[in-house]
Amino acid sequence: MSQSKSIDLDAVDTQQESFAKNRANVVAKNAVTQNGIRNSARVPEEVARNTSVFDIEVQQGERTDQKRSGRCWMFASLNTMRFRTIKKYNLKTFELSQAYPLFWDKLEKSNWFLENILDTLDEPRDGRLVAFLLTDPVGDGGQWDMFRALVKKYGVVPKEAMPDSACAKNTFQMDAYLTRYLRKCACVLRGAHEDGKTIDELREQKESMLKNVYQMLTICLGTPPKSFDVNLRDKDDKLVLSGTFTPKEFFDKAVGMNLDDYISIVSAPTADKPFNHVYTVDRLGNVIEAGGVRYLNLTPDQLKKVAIAQLKDGLPVWFGCDVDQSYLQNDGVMDLSAVDVDGLFGFDVDKGFTKAERLDYGESVMTHAMTFEGVNLDKDGKPTLWKVENSWGKDHGKNGFDSLTDDWFSEYVYQVVVDKKYLTEEQRHIYETEEPKVLAPWDPLGALA
């Protein structure tokens, strides 16, 4: 670094004296050192605007809780599915097993990872691609397209048929040991390749490795059921569904959702991703035969339009966002105006950074998936506030749900999943026929909720 300059200690002394003379700085320091940044920057009048009453609302069952796991995308997906079961059978509440898809996702991701290792045997180990593959082979996160692939292949089961184990409630140790084992497998496969083993010999090794993964997952999560008994009673205690089902039979009977109708709409305004085009992410997926992900990139207003249309038809909406931005967890409020960090520090921290710039510079990506279950509209039919079903339990936020303002949606919601019938004819045509542009594995749109 040419002409680098170190910190001037005299300038530090001057800054310290100046800071101490500024009343606002001192008040801010006293507040933050005791209460933290968000609590000190909280604007109560803005928080109070986030009502608990909504014009359009779908009623769910009891709030779900992902515990200490990164399964939000599964909870959000299953919450959109259980809604159909609750409505169909007039149930008070109902919950689908989240441990069941977790088991199959880990197994499928392990296979996906090992196949990618076999596909990159001649790539340098310290190159960006292999280094990326080794970073997080089987993390908890995922995308709607990946969940759809799991359900089409494995179905779903009620929570009673495969309840959460200790490792489902807290996935850290299971993920750590599984990741360690898969990295070891990558080392063994690449070493065998260098020793001249054929691809058929490497695939034999890979199959043996997958058997060990299955054994580890069964020890951690239990054995996924091939069939199970069901007895559902409605709000009046009347038996409304009884019998023995396989997971795929139960999905068809109790959920009855046409999975292929529901597609991912994203909103990423970066220069390399023009709106009204289709994108995929290289090497992102889980179920090999299902392929990867497919997105249609639209403006935030278009995402809002299709989400509102689905809510008006009485169905919840899966969505992905950057949850920790301007978020007051105790209040259950995502609101740009309710957290005045810039006023607290005395200069722009939040402002002056566009959505595209945040994506380009690594400041924001999709980090969490939840479900829209309500929205408020103004006199012109424009959204003002959205009701959100989270998966952090009933004691979180407002009896387990959050609210987010419409301007927060514009800045930090990156994806919604809706029935493609809500798109325009032109948008559907683009989604169904356009060859997707392939984005790099590390592109922001490859972030997993």
Image (tube, grey):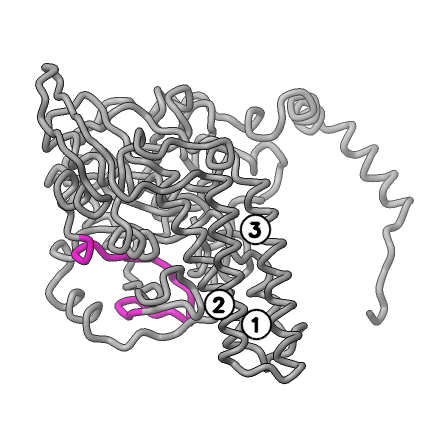
Question: What's the residue type where badge 2 is placed?
Answer: Pro
The vertical placement of 217 against 127, above or below, is above
Which span of residues is magenta-colored? 259-278
Give the residue at x 10% y 65%: 425
433 magenta-colored: no
Q: Secondary structure at mark 3?
A: helix
Image position of 17 (left or right of 57): right
Query: Could you say which is closer to the camera, residue 193 or residue 34?
Result: 193
Q: Which mark is residue 129?
A: 1
Question: What's the residue type where badge 1 is placed?
Answer: Leu
Of the numbered discs 2 and 3, the one sitting upstream in the chain is: 3
Find disc 2 in the rendering and name its residue: 441
Whether residue 339 is visible? no
Of the numbered discs 1 and 3, the one sitting upstream in the chain is: 1
Q: Which mark is residue 90?
A: none
Q: Tell me which corner region of the image, top left, top right, bottom left or bottom right, holds residue 395.
A: top left
Q: Secondary structure at mark 1?
A: helix
